[in-house]
Amino acid sequence: MMSLLWIIGRYSVFLGVENRYMMKKAFLFISALLALAACKNGSVVQTEVREYADSTSHAFLKMHAELPLPSDAVSSAIRSSLIDVMDGQLSQVSYGEPQRYFPRFDGDAGDTDALLSYYGQQTMKQIAQLSQEDADEREFLIRENDELTAEEREEMLAGFPSWEYDFNLRKVADTLNYVVFLSENYVYMGGAHGGVTGGGYLTYDKKSGSLVEKMLDPACVTDIQPVLVRGLMRYYSEVGAEMPEEEMLEHLQVEGGIIPLPAWTPYPTKEGLVFVYQQYEIASYADGMPSFTVPYAEIKPWLTAEAKSVLSSYRF
């Protein structure tokens, strides 16, 4: 690029700097070339989408996976990282302590159909087994309950809840410097209600293809409390549960009155950094998933170096 600019500069000198018309043409030409170069360096991450669905007597599985096409080193690196996310989520589906239930896909990582088919079949096999074990245990307890009438027993036996696992991995933002994917799953395992799991918002640097592990310095938790309080105050106000600050802090379910950083890494938007807390993370299930946006000017002192790198196109 520098050699190209040098040639154009020499061309302008040859024409004569006093020729304003030719200088303007040279300037527009340079601007166009720079714009084309910028588009190439920050080109859109092309993706492909695959879906999978299956069910058994007591379980449903739905999968939606959007993965980058492995067209270059950056896209391939992002794709590999997202496959890691998929593998980590699906191979540990259980209602107990997380543990791996089947091996990682060892076929062609570029074959999305084979990839999704493998994880779909293996995950379905796992939740089919677990949901059947759950149904068998429920049936045993119902049949052994002498306090139930025959009619009550038959009614309960006919009303077993079905498990549900919805896996979702999709691109939600693509800018000059970064691309964001959302890993968000809905899981219901026969309890009172389902819940949201997943890796959350995953921001990748488009220069290297690497995942931005931390947007904020973890040591900033104490200093950032006023920012988190203001954000949560806005959230509760927007959902119609406005309350004084002291009441809100008492309402939250946090240790020592200190609001933690969310488990999901905050993700960037044009307006600022978005914080999303999962169900039960800082509040009751009824509170949903508290979320709010903090302008970059407000959060700037605590941004990590890698965060500042992918946010370099924003002024703050």
Image (cartoon, helix red, strand yellow):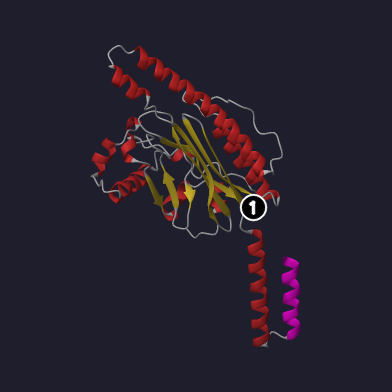
What amino acid does circle 1 point to? Lys
In front of the other: 102 or 300: 102
Q: Toward which corner of the image does residue 5 lie, by quadrant?
A: bottom right
- Residue 289, position as x, y percentages in the image: 38, 42
- Secondary structure that dominates the magenta span: helix
310 relative to 282 in the view: left or right: right
Task: Tell me the residue that label 1 is attached to.
Answer: 207
Write the residue at 74% across / 70% down.
Answer: 4
Write the residue at 65% across / 44% down.
Answer: 112
Q: Toward which corner of the image does residue 137 lie, by quadrant?
A: top left
Does 140 appear above or below 206? Answer: above
Instruction: Report if residue 2 lies within the magenta region.
Output: yes
In what element is the residue under mark 1?
A: loop
Q: How many discs mark residues in the rendered view?
A: 1
In front of the other: 263 or 312: 263
Does 16 appear above or below 290? Answer: below
Write the residue at 24% across / 39% down.
Answer: 247
Residue density around tag 1, few if under 14, some if 14–19, many if 20 or more, within 10 Å: some
- Residue 61, position as x, y percentages in the image: 51, 36
Instruction: Report if residue 315 lies within the magenta region.
Output: no
- Residue 80, position as x, y percentages in the image: 65, 42
The segment highlighted magenta reads 1-15
Does 266 appear above or below 25? Answer: above
Which quadrant holds the N terminus? bottom right
- Residue 275, position as x, y percentages in the image: 42, 46
